[in-house]
Image (spheres, rainbow, N blue to C red):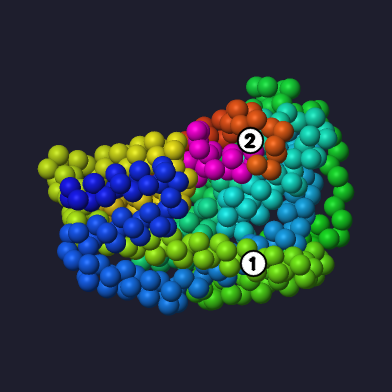
Amino acid sequence: MTEATNGIVILLGLIFLRMPIAFAMSLVGGVGFALMRDWNAAGAMVGNAVFETGLSYSLSVVPLFIFMGNVLANSGIAHGLFAGADRLFGRMKGGLALATVLSCGGFSAVSGSSLATAATMSRVAMPPMRKFGYSDSLAAGSIAAGGTLGILILPSVIMIIYGLLTESDIGKLFIAGLLPGLLGIVLYMAAVMVAVRVRPDLAPPVTEPSAMTARDRIGAFGTLALFVFVMGGIYGGFFTPIEAAGMGAIFSLGLALLIRGLDWPGFVDACRQTIHSSGMIFAIIIGAEIFSAFVNFAGLPDGLVDMVYDYDLSAWGVILIMVAIYLVMGCVFESLSMILLTVPVFYPVVVQLEFTGLLADPELVLIWFAVIVVVVTEISLITPPVGMNVFVLRSVLDDVSLGTIFRGVFPFWIADILRLALLLALPVVSLALLL
């Protein structure tokens, strides 16, 4: 266990020195395994991790869902989503901010990426909100927070990686994330309503929503149809997540061509982004597999389980400690790093915990824990001083300060804490669709 602890400290040091996490985990895991056993065994372990990851059929879901999101992002589909949401809420105080949250939820539901959602919606939603006199803090905050929904609602890349790391059923993880994702949208919209009531100067008087073009209608309803098609097919058992990813990619391409929003350069760029993102994710997963093999061989998970029994900690006490660790880590780490660093260590501990009632089923415990982990990771995306979504937004809106964006996301951060408390207290919210 001591070797694993030293390895984690070295890993954190390498990450703070800005070494890419994929290489840092591979280096620490490979060298640590070699020092504890021998170099031949370490070489075999590394080779096996690379081979199995590269040939994993389950991993084919990653580039397919990423391609689907890139096609929709490059086709201008977000304009239709925003216009549709504006028609629904434009006559309410703070209507454009409400439309931004809803359209972020819709776009993230098909893109699977929080960073892509924040970057895309900043270009779509920020100009009209500024035009009608919304404060920069509310406008930027609604975009940055709305973008966090992308890692929970299907097709969540983070959920896929969690499923691959823990060998969980990815389809069930997607289904479990649906209600918490919808709850997040509702609470974010409530946060906007409360903010504009407490501070009326954040939003202008009610204005007439803009008209939707035929292209906007096709884009909005097509995106909804895509989500229902993919989610309904998985939930209904008509096809597997991998089959859903393939059909979703074809559906998105057809939708983009239908609204004439994707030209040849846009298609090539979508392919290039897919290759780049998929390669990065594959490298990270390989690094995580190597690091996981090292910490398991060093006995860290077993040591933590023994510690739980030695201190007679309850299952809920252990979960709350883990959540507290995630909240602290979210102040300095981005979401993917948190998942990859903690899941190999925490997951074996959660397997050993004993719950009662609904969580007496070990499989449901692990699915519920996945939702909790992803929600806490969402919170980290808007938590200072890192807040990756905030920094993405700052890179796009170079005339808006980080302080302004962080002030804007504070009501949404409170909403996220409330959602986390509800999911902890009422596991049925995450598991209702699986019962």
Residue 141 is marked as 2
User: As drawn, is 259 to the left or to the right of 36?
Assistant: right
Q: Examine the image and state in which quarter residue 74 appears.
A: bottom right
**What's the CA distance linking mark 1 and mark 2?**
30 Å
Query: Is residue 199 depicted above or below 299 in this figure?
Result: above
Picture coordinates of residue 211 (x, y %)? 87, 49
Query: At 28% from the left edge and 70% from the top edge, which residue is drawn?
Result: 43
Picture coordinates of residue 341 (x, y %)? 36, 51
Q: Nearer the viewer, residue 17 or 411?
A: 17
Q: Nearer the viewer, residue 125 or 329?
A: 329
* Residue located beneath label 1 in the image: 272
Q: Which residues are magenta?
A: 377-394
Query: At 76% from the left edge and 58% from the top edge, which residue is drawn?
Result: 76
Q: Amino acid at mark 2?
A: Gly
Q: Are marks 1 and 2 in contact (CB under 8 Å)?
A: no
Was residue 390 drawn as part of the magenta stretch in this picture?
Answer: yes
Q: Nearer the viewer, residue 211 or 358?
A: 211
State which tag comes first along the sequence, 1 or 2.
2
Picture coordinates of residue 105 (x, y %)? 63, 50
Query: At 61% from the left edge and 75% from the top edge, which residue is drawn?
Result: 247
User: As drawn, is 271 to the left or to the right of 85?
Assistant: left
Q: Amino acid at mark 1?
A: Arg
On the question of residue 332 being in view, the answer is yes
User: As drawn, is 393 to the left or to the right of 320?
Assistant: right
Circle 1 residues within 10 Å: few <14, some 14–19, many ≥20: some
Query: Is residue 148 depicted above or below 403 in this figure?
Result: below
